[in-house]
Image (cartoon, rainbow, N blue to C red):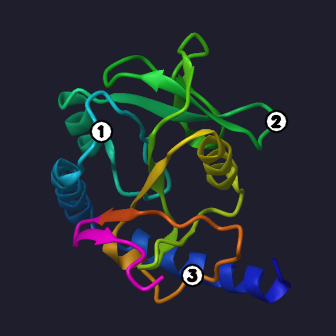
Amino acid sequence: MSDAATASKADLRAAALARRAAVPAEARAAAADRVAALVETLDLPAGTLVSGFLPIRGEIDPQPAMARLAARGHRLCLPVILDDRTTMIFRAWTPGEPLEPARFGLSVPPETAAVVDPAVMLVPLAAFDRRGFRIGYGKGHYDRAIARIAAAGPLLEIGIAFACQEIARVPDEPHDRPMRLVLTEAGRVDCGADR
């Protein structure tokens, strides 16, 4: 990526994260409930394995959505960053099962939990556009995990964010893989209509 594109992404990320941080607490809870209601619109095969995440740094809370998915009979897993600090894997998890503290302020399933590859990924975002391109936190964890899992079979990526994190256009590159959907409190964004 060029230095200009990297600087542009950093500026867009910082602005979107500042808007996200300004979302009031009562609006956060309502947004999480709205996104949970939107997962009911997902047409997923029975028992689909879905990766979720536990919110950090002001992220929208996907736990109500994950609870609805589990109630519909879908299996869940959570991301885990390995000791090399670059590799992200996913471990099976059911809401209510114990978690262990990990780096980056995360809580993760224990090492005894099965390592799995999800068919559907709920992806936390710093920023996104309507084409489905996203800006993450700049470490590439999700980029590498998505590339690895998608190379092995079908993968549906669904961004989860506040509506205020939408931007006009993410500076994307040929290797970037767009998401198919983004769920926000303002509704469901079916991405790619203008691709």
Q: Where is residue 174 in the image (x, y as percent from the top left)?
A: 70, 74
Q: Is residue 134 left or right of residue 88?
A: left
* Residue 13 or residue 152, whichever sits in front: 152
The residue under label 1 is 66
Q: Is mark 3 on a helix, strand or loop?
A: loop
**Span highlighted in magenta in the image:** 184-195
131 magenta-colored: no
Q: Is residue 73 left or right of residue 152?
A: left
Image quadrant where residue 103 sits: top right
The residue under label 3 is 170
Q: Is mark 2 on a helix, strand or loop?
A: loop
Nearer-N-terminus badge (1/2): 1
The residue at 49%/47% (across/down) is 155
For badge 1, the amino acid type reads Met
Q: What element carries label 1?
A: helix
For residue 10, which numbered disc appears in the image? none
For badge 3, the amino acid type reads Val
The residue at 43%/47% (across/down) is 55
Nearest-to-viewer mark from 2 and 3: 3
| Distance in Å between CA atoms under marks 2 and 3 | 28 Å
